[in-house]
Amino acid sequence: MPFLHRVGFSSVRLARNGRVSMQRRLAHDERSMYDAFPFTYHNRRKAFAVKYVVFVGTGFSIPFIASWYQIRKSGGTAA
């Protein structure tokens, strides 16, 4: 009979919480401020900054270059 009592108690707990309680494991992540990228750049921050600005600047400038080209191709007033 004690077994049925335990089964009933766990099914009530499951119905109340919506899930079976599991052991939670504590984890410590060793990431620091500069570990958010999947590569290292600790000694080359200036080179990384230049590469980043060129990469982002190229992507940002593409619509403006395309607009300038289309206006120029159609013979618009842009010089």
Image (tube, grey):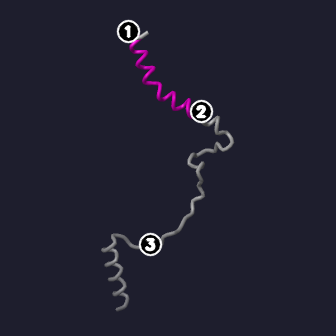
| Label number found at residue 22 | 3
Q: Position of residue 65 (x, y in %)?
A: 45, 20
Label whose residue precedes the other's in the sequence (1 or 3) = 3
> What segment is highlighted magenta in the picture?
50-75
Q: Quadrant of the C terminus?
A: top left
Three-letter code for the amino acid on which mark 1 is drawn: Thr
| Label number found at residue 51 | 2
Q: Quadrant of residue 3?
A: bottom left
Q: Which residue is mark 1?
A: 77
Q: CA distance from mark 1 to mark 2?
A: 35 Å
The reply to whether callout 1 and callout 2 are in contact (CB within 8 Å) is: no
- The number of numbered discs placed on residues in the rendered structure image is 3
Q: Quadrant of residue 39?
A: top right
Label whose residue precedes the other's in the sequence (1 or 2) = 2
Give the overall secondary structure of the magenta segment: helix
Residue 71 on the magenta span: yes
Judged left or right of residue 18, residue 66 is right
Three-letter code for the amino acid on which mark 2 is drawn: Lys
**Badge 1 element:** loop
* Residue found 69% across the figure and 42% down from its top: 43
Is 29 or 32 nearer to us in this picture?
32
The vertical placement of 34 against 7, above or below, is above
* Residue found 33% across the figure and 70% down from its top: 18
Q: CA distance from mark 1 to mark 3?
A: 70 Å
The reply to whether callout 1 and callout 3 are in contact (CB within 8 Å) is: no
Is 28 or 16 nearer to us in this picture?
28
Label 3 environment density (alpha carbons within 10 Å; few <14, some 14–19, many ≥20): few
Q: Position of residue 1 (x, y in %)?
A: 34, 92
Residue 57 on the magenta span: yes
Q: Position of residue 70 (x, y in %)?
A: 39, 15
Residue that sits furthest to the bottom in the current view: 1
